[in-house]
Amino acid sequence: MNKAESQRIASYLETMGYEASAAMPDANLIILNTCVVRRSAEEKVLGTLGYLKGLKKARLNPSIVVTGCFVNSRIATLERQFPHVELFFKPGEYTQLANWAQKHDISAPSPEEPFTMPHQPSPSTFVPIIQGCNNFCSYCIVPYRRGRERSRSPEEITCEVEELVKRGVKEVTLLGQNVNSYGHDLSQHASLASLLAELNNIAGLMRIRFLTNHPKDMSLELIKTIASLDKVCEHISVAAQAGDDAILKAMRRGYTAKEYRQLIHTIRHYIPEVALSTDVIVGFPGETEEQFQRTLNLLDELRFDTVHVAAYSPRPGTIASRKYEDIVPAEIKRKRLHQIEERQTNIASEINSQFKGKIVEVLVESKKRDKWYGRTRTDKLVFFKSEDDCLGQLVKVKVDKTSPWALQGKLTLDEGN
């Protein structure tokens, strides 16, 4: 979501004549788009704000603007704490930035909805469809910073995707803190399933993805829709967070480990070739070794393609920070995190090794050094060499090398497997 919002902010500034600067000391305007999901992220924000204060004193007064989840409802407090910042605005509230820009630059375009789309977007581009979250998981700060769920209209989203396709986009990833909840707050009948079906009809659009899914809100209708639509990729991210029922209840996740297992089995039944990714938190307050082992067992059993693991850190203002003491020692958290990382590396190695010698379809996103790279429909990162301009193309690559994190191969015209 932050990447998508940064793209829109950058595009808006481009319409005012700004150009991207390679380094902060060279910039006339610095916009800090923040994340504070974890304590380390917030500490990084504070450190950067301190650096910017020194930068402002040392040179020709750059304008500093801060947005993202660091910006809470107490903006006046932030303004007093960081007087060197010209503007704080909440994530997604672009009109505040536009109004500020108009006061400082008469050439600034008027606020618009949807906010400015990228003029030269990547072949694979993010499209936010719903902001905020209503779940209030006990460890999460997001609902307090981004507010309750607010869906964009299907017509607005469809119009945006059609325009992006005209600008060269081949794949869109629909975004939401809880993307499964899309449409429930609209007066008209709308859902993620119906939106996917509508976007699937757009000529020139090749692939559709969506992030992030909450297990309790992932319906059978949505699963069947994914299976039936040719442009919707066989890749689903569905966060487990834990494999122990007591921990899941304390997290306020709204499902049991058994229900989560059943959801994964259902997804694989209807979409046999699906690649699955998940999120896990270790060291939640009170987590015992036995409870952690249940999470490890869940990952061993379900064998995800990707696991994003984080150690619990208390976020002031969340339910968990008020209700539970952070009693799991840091060294135990690190040990459990490394256990999962090591186990998942082995699982991902085994899964990806099955691609060796096979031909995969890759949407080329960019080039790194002398290699092009892109992703398969199942979100496998693939690198290959070519002297041709492959950007935005769907190409066939024969895999000759695999790792837990990526595939390597050679461009081929062979359509076989």
Image: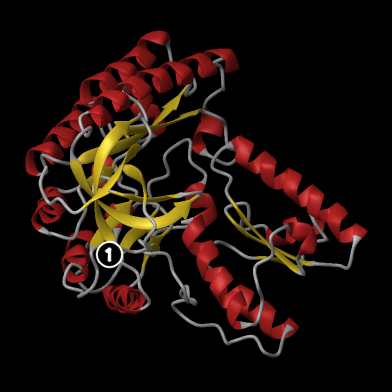
The answer to whether residue 254 is visible is: no
Image quadrant holding the C terminus, namely top left
Q: Position of residue 359 (x, y in %)?
A: 19, 44
Q: Read off the residue under disc 1.
A: 183
Residue at the far top: name it: 290
Q: Residue at x 52, y 44 (%)?
A: 141
Q: Residue at x 35, y 76 (%)?
A: 160
Q: Residue at x 46, y 73 (%)?
A: 120
Looking at the image, is 328 positioned above or below residue 220?
above
The answer to whether residue 289 is visible is: yes
> What is the total number of numbered labels drawn onto the structure image?
1
Q: Residue at x 10, y 47 (%)?
A: 416
Looking at the image, is 348 positioned above or below residue 222?
above
Residue at the far right: name it: 58
Q: Position of residue 187 (x, y in %)?
A: 26, 73
- 65, 393: nearer the viewer: 393
What's under tag 1, amino acid-wise? Answer: Gly
Question: Seen in the image, is 335 located left or right of residue 349?
Answer: right
Looking at the image, is 311 positioned above or below residue 167?
above
Looking at the image, is 16 positioned above or below residue 299?
below
Q: Position of residue 347 (x, y in %)?
A: 29, 23
Q: Secondary structure at mark 1?
A: loop
How packed mark 1 is, by other alpha carbons closer than 10 Å (few <14, some 14-19, many 20 or more), is many
- 289, 302: nearer the viewer: 302
